[in-house]
Amino acid sequence: MSFAASFRPSSRCSSGRAEPPPGGHEASHEPGHEPGHEPGRERGWALVSVLWAITLLSLMAAATQALTVTSYRSETHAMIDARAEADLDAAVVAAVLGVSDLRPERRWRADGTATDFSFDGFAMQVSAQDELGRIDLNVSSGALITQLLLGAGLAPDEAGKLADGIVYWRSKTGLQNLRGATDDEYRAAHLTYLPRHGPFQTVDEVKLVLGMTPKLFAAIRPALTVYSKRPSFDSSVAPREALAALYPGDPGKVEQIVRARSGDPNASMQLGFSPAAAATLAAPSGRAFSIEARLTVGRRTFARSAVVELTSSKQRPYFVLAWH
């Protein structure tokens, strides 16, 4: 092969610059134009990221606002609750002062009749019940308890048996001639308790006596107490349910007595009842009173229940026996 045939010119020109390939164009190496690089797509992802960030921030702001509103409502309810509780306490104190007032014309009724009472901008319903107007579960006779159960609608046999069961509960073991449930009957009923064989501690305890039903207890509950310590009750301040024990089967007589207390002249004349005379009683020192107070705020109702015993001491005018 000759020297001329074996020699091929270089692809670079004399200036050192490479010649473009035949029929082609010089490749561009400008920034942003590398192969596979798409500027529009990157801008799209950036926009999506910004939108997601804005959405998350909006959700966080909404959650913070909801939490703030919830916290505000909770604090508002707590303030209302505290105010209502304080006002109910004030109502109890007002009732204590009312039933112990030495001025007959200012003294509150103590037969469970509700009294309108306003305090701190709230209107409340407050009632006071002298416990001497109720039947004491611990000292009343079985006969009186039977009368109470008859007034509540029980048949004579059922009333007598349940009354014996109540007496048996509070009596010492070995008591004879009672038809009420014995310890063995409580065991046979697979109950986890036996009769106390001691005084009832609360009125609600009578619900544990065999034969007592929720419906019957609700009917006689206003007539019962464990605070009077007397075998009889004062009919001048007795609630309807206790009066029914005096006149079982005669609700008309009971209503007549209640009307007479309210000042109905016809009822008073027929019964020989004088509300004015009853109001001249001395201050009821040493007597226990149940006080109920109710307060409604919006759709919420608050209640206070207390039992207090009055004293003649100026330093401590009453003792609290129960508080709910």
Image (cartoon, rainbow, N blue to C red):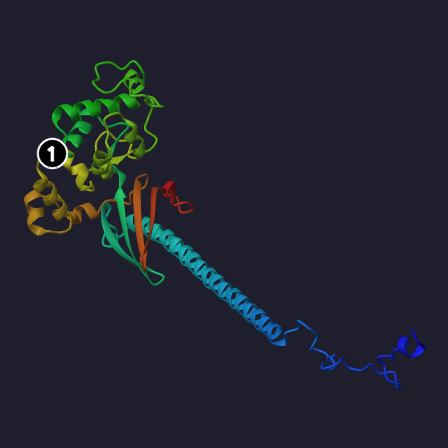
Looking at the picture, how far across and down is residue 294, in whole percent? 30, 52
Give the residue at the far front of this rendering.
1
Residue receiving disc 1: 248
Q: Secondary structure at mark 1?
A: loop
Q: Quadrant of residue 198?
A: top left
Please tell me which residue lies in front, 214 or 151.
214
Q: Is residue 235 visible?
A: no
Q: Nearer the viewer, residue 309 or 58?
A: 58
Residue 184, percent from left and from top:
29, 15
The image position of residue 186, as x and y in percent, is: 30, 20
Q: Is residue 6 left or right of residue 309?
A: right
Q: The residue under label 1 is which amino acid type?
A: Pro
Asked if residue 6 lies left or right of residue 153, the reply is right
- In the figure, is residue 224 to the left or right of 4? left
The residue at 10%/40% (across/down) is: 251
Identify which residue is drawn at 14% across, 45% down. Answer: 258
Q: Number of callouts in the render?
A: 1
Q: Quadrant of the C terminus?
A: top left
Residue count near mark 1 (Cα–Cα under 10 Å), binned few <14, some 14–19, many ≥20: some
Q: Is residue 190 above or below residue 222?
A: above
